[in-house]
Image (spheres, rainbow, N blue to C red):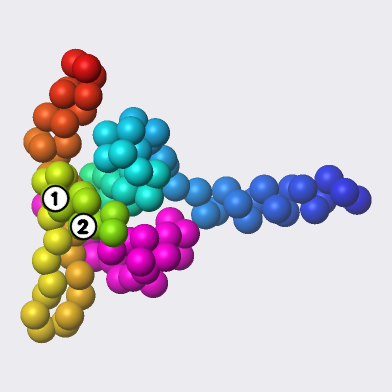
Amino acid sequence: MESDHKGSAMDFLMKCTMTFYPQLARLTGTITAGLMLSHAVSCSWRKGNYSGWFSKSLAEWTEETGLTAREQVQACRLLRKLGVLEKTRDTQSGQMWFRVNGARLIELLQQVGDE
């Protein structure tokens, strides 16, 4: 009977997975910014998303990453300062849109790799 519980728990957890790149945490200097950037990379470069822009609310970021609103704001501020995350608000809908600056991300990853 115990294996049934383990199976259902694993099924549940597998539905809620996301990719985390530890190199991005090292690059940003924080786990939270690394986690946010890892998720942004996945969202920006999804199959069929040629512009790279994706929309996320604070609630969606929390649900998908586990980051609190405060952690998101701090991580986003750092990622924008590093130049790896672009952010804009749709003036009509109020939605927040994000995009990873791939060229800047590669540049920073190469710098870290050279150290």
The residue at which mark 2 appears reads as 77
The type of residue carrying mark 2 is Arg
| Membership of 65 in magenta stretch | yes
Quarter of the C terminus within the rendering: top left
Residue 25 point in image, percent of width and height = 35, 38
Report the front residue among 82 and 91.
82
Q: Secondary structure at mark 1?
A: helix
Q: Considering only vertical position in the picture, is 23 above or below 85?
A: above
Which range of residues does the magenta coloring cover?
Answer: 50-73
Instruction: Tell me if residue 52 can be seen.
Output: no
Q: Secondary structure at mark 2?
A: helix
**Res 90 quadrant in image:** bottom left
Residue 52 point in image, percent of width and height = 16, 51
Instruction: Tell me if residue 69 can be seen.
Output: yes
Residue 58 point in image, percent of width and height = 33, 70
Residue 18 is left or right of residue 76, and the answer is right
Residue 82 is left or right of residue 66, and the answer is left
Q: Considering only vertical position in the picture, is 104 above or below 68?
A: above
Spatial CA distance of label 2 from label 1 is 6 Å
Residue at 39% x, 72% y is 59
The residue at which mark 1 appears reads as 81
